[in-house]
Image: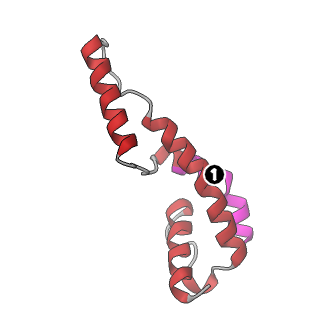
Amino acid sequence: MDICEREYVAAVINYFWGPNLTNAHSVNESAASIAFEALEPAGDCSGSMALVPRPTLMASPSYAVKQLAEIGKRITSGDTSIYNICKSAVGIRYKSPIQIA
């Protein structure tokens, strides 16, 4: 890994497991591997969350259509943002392995 790649890997690690956990100089192949492994469940979780309609008091047919259209819009636009709940779950699941790496 070159220094630029190490900086980006450090940014991913710090995003999931807290700021200043690592820096470019302390990133190794093992840490990069664990961070990469964590991205899949984070993406799966966020993809599932994107399918959940937003809450309402009473769901009318027009509301349901509007929500489904928004979900479809996010999916087709390639929205791959990670929901905080998914970020937290991945952070907890991979906390020990990333600290060991």
Neighbor class of circle 1 (other Cα within 10 Å; few <14, some 14-19, many 20+) is: few
**Considering depth in this image, is 99 or 73 the residue closer to the camera?**
73
Residue at image position (70%, 77%) is 29
In the image: residue 79, left or right of residue 45? left
Q: How is the image coloured?
A: secondary structure
Which span is picked out in magenta? 87-101
Q: Position of residue 78 (x, y in %)?
A: 40, 49
Q: What amino acid type is highlighted by mark number 1?
A: Ile
- State how many labels appear: 1
Residue at image position (52%, 51%) is 87
Assign the N terminus to one quadrant of the image: bottom right
Assign the C terminus to one quadrant of the image: bottom right
Residue at image position (68%, 64%) is 34
Compared with 80, 23 (above or below) is: below
Compared with 96, 28 (above or below) is: below
Q: Position of residue 27 (x, y in %)?
A: 63, 79
**Considering depth in this image, is 14 or 52 the residue closer to the camera?**
52
Can residue 20 be seen here? The reply is no
Displayed quadrant of residue 99: bottom right
**Considering depth in this image, is 89 or 49 the residue closer to the camera?**
49
Q: Position of residue 9 (x, y in %)?
A: 56, 73
Residue that numbered label 1 is attached to: 92
In the image: residue 89, left or right of residue 78? right
**Considering depth in this image, is 68 or 56 the residue closer to the camera?**
68
Of helix, strand and loop, which one carries label 1? helix
Q: Secondary structure of the magenta portion, mostly?
A: helix
Residue at image position (50%, 85%) is 4
Displayed quadrant of residue 38: bottom right
Pick out the residue farthest to the front.
76
Q: Is residue 54 magenta?
A: no
